[in-house]
Amino acid sequence: MAKNNRSKGPGERRKSAAEETHRQARETEATAQEQTAVLTEETGRKRRRRFGHN
């Protein structure tokens, strides 16, 4: 997902900071999912069950 880094003024700055934090959290989660995929390299069943909310 491409991130739009345009700033629209002071009203957007707080939102952008929150989005940045959220993006970092998602990257961390994605890394964890990749590691989990390596660890549970069966048919991906456990991974699908655990991360089925995505």
Image (tube, rainbow, N blue to C red):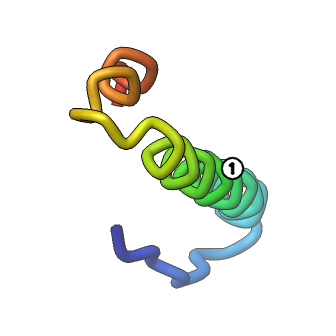
Asked if residue 25 is positioned above or below residue 6 in the image, the reply reads above
Residue hosting label 1 = 25
Where residue 1 sits, quadrant-wise, is bottom left
Residue 45 lies, in percent from the top left, at 27, 23
Residue at the far top in the pictured view: 49
Residue 2 lies, in percent from the top left, at 37, 76
Where residue 51 sits, quadrant-wise, is top left
Residue 8 lies, in percent from the top left, at 58, 75
Of the pair 38 and 25, the residue shown nearer to us:
38
The mark total stands at: 1
Dot 1 amino acid type? Ala
Residue at the far front in the pictured view: 42
Asked if residue 45 is positioned above or below residue 13 in the image, the reply reads above
Of the pair 47 and 9, the residue shown nearer to us:
47
Residue at the far left in the pictured view: 43
* Residue 48 in the figure: left or right of residue 14: left
* Residue 34 in the figure: left or right of residue 10: left
Are there few (<14), some (14-19), or many (20+) residues within 10 Å of tag 1?
A: few
Quarter of the image with the C terminus is top left
Asked if residue 9 is positioned above or below residue 42 in the image, the reply reads below
- For image coordinates 45% across by 77% down, the residue present is 4
Residue 22 lies, in percent from the top left, at 65, 49
Residue at the far bottom in the pictured view: 6
* Residue 46 in the figure: left or right of residue 26: left
Of the pair 27 and 22, the residue shown nearer to us:
27
- For image coordinates 47% across by 51% down, the residue present is 38
- For image coordinates 45% across by 36% down, the residue present is 40
- For image coordinates 69% across by 60% down, the residue present is 24
Of the pair 26 and 8, the residue shown nearer to us:
26
Secondary element type, mark 1: helix
Asked if residue 33 is positioned above or below residue 34 in the image, the reply reads above
